[in-house]
Amino acid sequence: MNKSTIWIGNDHGGYELKQHIIEFLKKKEIPYNDIGTDSTEIVRYPYFAAKVAGAVSRGEAERGILICSTGIGMSIIANKFKGVRASLCTSTFAGKMTRAHNNSNLLVLGGKVTGTLEALDILEAWLTTEYEGGRHGISLGLISEAEDTLCNGDTWEPTGPMR
């Protein structure tokens, strides 16, 4: 599978929105790998989040999309994976800014809290916005430093200027 293929994971709360996202990706001819549940029958979201976030963390995928009812649970578990910058977005502006400033590699959406048209606008912004780099790289470097330290069981206390 190509690394540019977008991995999509969802639970029962994200099933309906996922169908719209898949249609969107098909129209744009963007390759995807759907590993989410295929119905509204209740399942446990951490399993699906781990598959997508794990693929991003291991470098098997450059980007992923997770969808549950609110997006909250998916974003919590996804951000436990090293190198994953999962962003729960509820507006198009957030979708754009999380790419531009945070170089987000995993978009999280709430299938029961964000309307379909808004979710597709968020996705479009997230897919088409490039990371700006520059001063934002400083913050991403601090996030990586914290992640390395905290994942080793140590306490991370930032040093240096806060500007």
Image: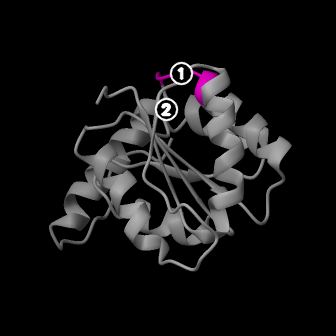
Q: How many marks?
A: 2
Left or right: 84 in relation to 127: left
Q: Is 26 or 82 nearer to us in this picture?
A: 26
Q: Is 150 or 81 nearer to us in this picture?
A: 81
In the displayed structure, would residue 77 be above or below residue 144?
A: below
As helix, strand or loop, the secondary structure at mark 1 comes to loop
Q: Over which residues does the magenta segment extend?
A: 127-134
Residue identifier under label 2: 136
Q: Can you tell which mark lies on residue 132?
A: 1
As helix, strand or loop, the secondary structure at mark 2 comes to helix
> Residue at horizontal 25%, vertical 38%?
59
- Is residue 132 highlighted in magenta? yes
In the displayed structure, would residue 121 be above or below residue 18?
A: above
- Is residue 120 highlighted in magenta? no
Does the image show residue 110? Answer: no
Percent coordinates x, y for residue 150 in the rendering: 25, 66
> Residue at horizontal 47%, vertical 78%?
44
Quadrant containing the N terminus is: top left
- Colour approach in the figure: one colour
Does the image show residue 49? Answer: yes
Percent coordinates x, y for residue 135 in the rendering: 49, 27
Percent coordinates x, y for residue 12 in the rendering: 61, 70
Which secondary structure type mostly characterizes the magenta part of the structure? loop
> Residue at horizontal 75%, vertical 38%?
120
